[in-house]
Image (tube, grey):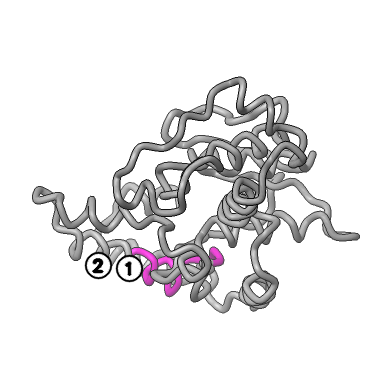
Amino acid sequence: KEYGQMVICVDSPNNWRKTVYPAYKANRKKKRDSSSDMDWPEVFRIINTIREELQQNFPYKVIQVEGAEADDIIGSLTLQTQEFGQHEPVMIVSSDKDFIQLQTYANVKQYDPIRKRWLDNPDPSGYLEEHIIKGDSGDGVPNILSADNCLAIRERQKAMTQKRLALYKGTTENMDEETLRRYHRNKMMIDLTEIPQKYKDQIRSEFDKEKEVGRSQLFNFFIKNETKETIKVK
C-alpha cells in the first residue's frame, strides 16, 4: 500500500541503444544461438503470452514502448517522481544492479526478489560513475580504455586498474580525446538520465493511459487456467 500501483515494465524487441552503439548486447544473440539445450523461440512465445495475459486480465499497468528497454521505463517513471508535486515512494523490484544509480533519489528503494534481500549502496552516484568508467561486459559495453567492438569480437579489454580508475574518477580532465569519447559512449548506454526525450514522452503517455481492466476478470481467468491456489488469495 505504501508504494501505490504496480507497474510491470517490459522490454521492446528493438532497442534505441543499438542504433547509437551497434555493439550493444551484440553477444547476447550469439550466445542464444549457440545454446543447443534451450528452445529460445518457445521461451519468447511464453514470455509474450504472459505479457498478453497480464495486459488483458489483470488490473496492473503493463508498459512496453517500441525501441525502449524495461530499464528505460523504470528509469523514466522514477525520474518523473522528481518533478514538482509527484514525489512519492518508489519500490523497484529487480535484482539488476543497474538500478542502484536511481537510489540517488531519496524516495527510491530496490528489492531483489531472487535473493530476497534489499539492494542498496551508500554512494549510488559513485557507483554509477565507476560503472560508466568500467563499462558493462554483460551488455557489450567495454571500459573507457577499450575499443567499441572489442567485446563483440572477443578481444581482451585494456585493464582498468585501481590506479587508472582513481585517475579518471571525479574528473574528465585526465582523459584524452578518444577516452573522453568512450566515456560519453558508456554514459549514454548506462546512465538512465541519458534516455532520449522521445522515449521519455512515449513512456509517460503510456503510463498516463487509464487501465480499463479491473479485478472483475481475475476470477474467470483463474478458473479457466485452473490456478486454484491463486483463487484463494486474489
Of residues 15 and 162, the one drawn nearer to the viewer in this rendering: 162
Range drawn in magenta: 49-61
Horizontal and vertical percent position of residue 146? 48, 43
Note whether 28 is above or below 202 in the view shown.
Answer: above
Q: Disc 1 on helix, strand or loop?
A: helix
The residue located at (52%, 41%) in the rendering is 135
Q: Is residue 210 visible?
A: no
Indicate which disc residue 45 carries.
2
Residue at the top extreme of this rendering: 163
Q: Disc 2 on helix, strand or loop?
A: helix
Name the amino acid type tagged 2: Arg
Note whether 140 is above or below 56 in the view shown.
Answer: above
Indicate which disc residue 48 carries.
1
Of residues 218 and 33, the one drawn nearer to the viewer in this rendering: 33
Q: Is residue 35 rendered to the left or right of residue 225?
A: left
Are dots 2 and 1 in contact, CB under 8 Å? yes
Horizontal and vertical percent position of residue 63? 53, 68
Name the amino acid type tagged 1: Asn
Residue at the front extreme of this rendering: 176
Q: CA distance from mark 2 to mark 1?
A: 5 Å
Q: Residues within 10 Å of mark 2 (few under 14, many from 20)?
A: few
The residue located at (27%, 67%) in the rendering is 224
